[in-house]
Amino acid sequence: MALFTLMVFALAKPFVYDASADQYKKGRDLILAIDASGSMAQSGFDLKDRFQTKYAITQSLSKDFIEKRFDDNMGVVVFGTFAYTASPLTYDLGSLSYLLEMTNVGLAGESTALGDAIMQSIRTLSYGQAKNKAIILLTDGYHNAGKSSPKEAVKKAKEAGIKIYTIGIGKKSDYDVSLLETIAKQSGAKSYTASSAKALSQIYKEINALEPSAIRSENYLNQRLLILYPLGLVFILLLLWVLSTKRSDR
């Protein structure tokens, strides 16, 4: 009866479901390095709202860019005379937007330290595990402060395989176009000019296409068959039965 029951149970193909979610993020490690120097307090960047400052518009469009990402490990570096990490790498993009909203012009000083901004971004990226790493550097000024030179910083980025997308904000005469183009080219990325809020929005869309998020992972059910367990018991019982039959024959 035991053998018959176990064989019927095995033929029924018993199984269990292991319900779990794919927790392994496959997106990019991405840093927004945003200029918060004094010149970012200038208005007139948005033709629809000339009273908004360049920094406020950059904040708003950066938050919109963050909201459209998923499965990315993102952080924010704010720079002026010096650079600091406003948010380390995180998958919690809602909190990242909140922290970005709390920053303001002048928090890091009035000058522009492009080299320090890149170096701080590289340090922040060093804590990430993604294969693809990138920095989006937004500025409206010339490099005139900091401990690190842009040349030295770009060299470090190249060694780490980090792309640096540069965005010059405002008129081309306001910032070092040549330097931003060199930074982007040497790191294998692109350089952009954002003369208005509309142009910056389009640039973010293009970068979003060039550096796409990974396919969003979904919950799955892993089926595990248990047929070997009853079959194993059947084999053991049959073996014991054969042995006991031989002994009784003797």
Image: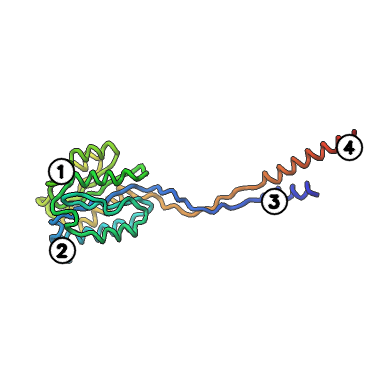
Closer to the N terminus: mark 1 or mark 4?
A: 1
Q: Which residue is mark 1?
A: 179
Residue 188 placement (x, y as % from top left): 25, 40
Which image quarter is the C terminus in? Answer: top right
Determine contact: label 3, label 1, CB under 8 Å: no
Amino acid at dot 3: Ala
Q: Which mark is residue 12?
A: 3
The answer to whether residue 8 is left or right of residue 132 is right
Q: Give yes or no for contact between labels 2 and 1 (Cβ–Cβ under 8 Å).
A: no
Q: Residue 102, how many percent across, how many down?
A: 25, 61
Q: Are marks 2 and 3 in contact (CB under 8 Å)?
A: no
Looking at the rendered structure, the secondary structure element under dot 4 is: helix
Q: CA distance from mark 3 to mark 4?
A: 34 Å
Question: If you read the primary sequence from the N terminus, does the residue marked by circle 3 or circle 1 appear first?
Answer: 3
Q: Nearer the viewer, residue 54 or 205?
A: 54
Judged by depth in the image, the label closer to the viewer, 1 or 4, is 4
**Residue type for callout 1:** Leu
- The residue identified by callout 2 is 47
In space, the residues marked 2 and 3 are separated at their CA atoms by 71 Å
Give left or right: position of 129 versus 169.
Answer: right
The reply to whether residue 189 is in sight is yes
